[in-house]
């Protein structure tokens, strides 16, 4: 059976695309993935999504979006797409051993933060460990936090966090930063930012919430601890674009290249959300681009 629309991904972008295409009577199939819901599934409290003045639990927000897509007739499967073929029409998408044909494909597979891959990171994720200062900075008013990273995003995160935290310690494994000179100078001039250079993170401390970070000096091997209430990762993001690399245009960082209408270089294939977004990576911007992709897909199908 040939589908009008297959949406690959089940975060804010994918579910919003599903809502819009389902309301347009396009009967979309959503391959939401085994880890459906995206990064919001590991976020305890979302305070900046419009329409929730007292905040909303991340998984609850995703459940609501899914229910809304269900209501309008989207078919949602918690399966991962494992292969795509965009070289012919209809397009072919494979999950498990099943091949689905589609007139239009909307890619909304998202991205995830690069991690340190230490056990405490997973245990304390959403309990003081975060990768988004814009999302979670307001929880640390009057507290002390740490940021790890050496690029512009680390400088931005650290500087942003000084709006709330009393002290921000910027941790970097080298003794100088790769960030742009102006960003480094801005951080160094900020009296709330301290620097822990030539240090790596040996462990994140705390049982049910972050209480501190253990650092290791890369030159001497000496261990030290700092007390913090929050720990922010700013070492980059990984777009989930691997299965599309031979099929559509992808930039050197792995992000899918799409224009302002969410069109990729293959007519009929659209991309939205964090898999195309180098900069904002917010639930609301992902949802907005999911809407754009759905409307672009509908117009494409109309000819």
Image (cartoon, rainbow, N blue to C red):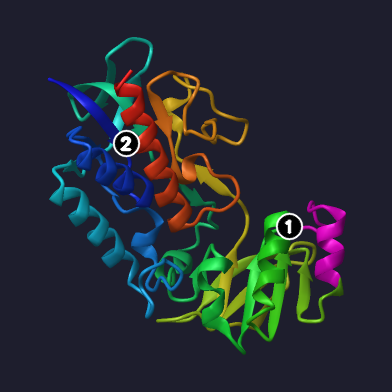
Residue 32 seen in the figure: no
Write down the region rendered in magenta. 173-188
**Residue tagged 1:** 150
Q: Secondary structure at mark 2?
A: strand
Q: From the viewer's perspective, tell me whether residue 254 is left or right of residue 127.
A: right
Q: Position of residue 137 (x, y in %)?
A: 56, 75
Instruction: Tell me: residue 167, above or below residue 181.
Output: below
Q: Position of residue 22 (x, y in %)?
A: 21, 40
Contact? badges 2 and 1 (CB < 8 Å): no
Check disc 2: other Cα within 10 Å, few if <14, some if 14-19, many if 20+. many
For the point 27% across and 24% down, which residue is it?
A: 93
Which residue lies most toward the top here?
88
The answer to which quarter of the image holds residue 127 is bottom left
For the point 70% across and 83% down, which residue is it?
A: 167
Q: Which mark is residue 59?
A: none
Q: Quadrant of the C terminus?
A: top left
User: Is residue 247 covered in magenta?
Assistant: no
Foreground of the two, 303 or 244: 303
For the point 87% across and 64% down, which residue is it?
A: 185
**Residue tagged 2:** 8
Q: From the viewer's perspective, tell me whether residue 226 is left or right of residue 205.
A: right
Which residue lies most toward the bottom here?
142
For the point 76% across and 76% down, which residue is it?
A: 193
Q: From the viewer's perspective, tell me whether residue 119 is left or right of residue 33.
A: right
């Amino acid at each position: 059976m040939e589908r009008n629309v297959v949406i690959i991904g089940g975060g804010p972008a994918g579910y919003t695309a599903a809502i819009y295409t389902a309301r347009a009577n396009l009967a979309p199939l959503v391959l939401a993935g085994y880890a459906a819901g995206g990064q919001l599934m590991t976020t305890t409290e979302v305070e900046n999504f419009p329409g929730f003045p007292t905040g909303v639990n991340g998984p609850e927000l995703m459940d609501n979006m899914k229910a809304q897509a269900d209501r309008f007739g989207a078919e949602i499967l918690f399966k991962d797409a494992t292969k795509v073929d965009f070289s012919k029409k209809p397009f072919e998408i494979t999950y498990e051993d099943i091949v689905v044909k589609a007139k239009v494909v909307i890619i909304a597979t998202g991205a995830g933060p690069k991690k340190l891959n230490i056990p405490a990171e997973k245990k304390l994720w959403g309990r003081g460990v975060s990768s988004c200062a814009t999302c979670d900075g307001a929880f640390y008013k009057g507290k002390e936090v740490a940021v790890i990273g050496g690029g512009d995003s680390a400088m931005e995160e650290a500087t942003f966090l000084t709006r709330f935290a009393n002290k921000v310690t910027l941790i970097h494994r080298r003794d100088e930063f790769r960030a742009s000179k102006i960003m480094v100078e801005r951080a160094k001039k900020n009296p709330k930012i301290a620097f822990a250079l030539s240090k790596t993170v040996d462990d994140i401390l705390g049982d049910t919430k972050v209480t501190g970070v253990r650092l290791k000096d890369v030159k001497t091997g000496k261990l030290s601890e700092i007390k913090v209430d929050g720990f922010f990762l700013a070492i980059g993001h990984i777009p989930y674009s691997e299965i599309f690399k031979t099929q559509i245009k992808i930039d050197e960082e792995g992000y899918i290249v799409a224009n302002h209408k969410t069109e990729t270089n293959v007519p009929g294939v659209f991309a939205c959300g964090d898999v195309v977004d180098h900069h904002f990576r917010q639930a609301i911007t992902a949802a907005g681009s999911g809407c754009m992709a759905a409307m672009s897909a509908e117009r494409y199908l109309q000819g």
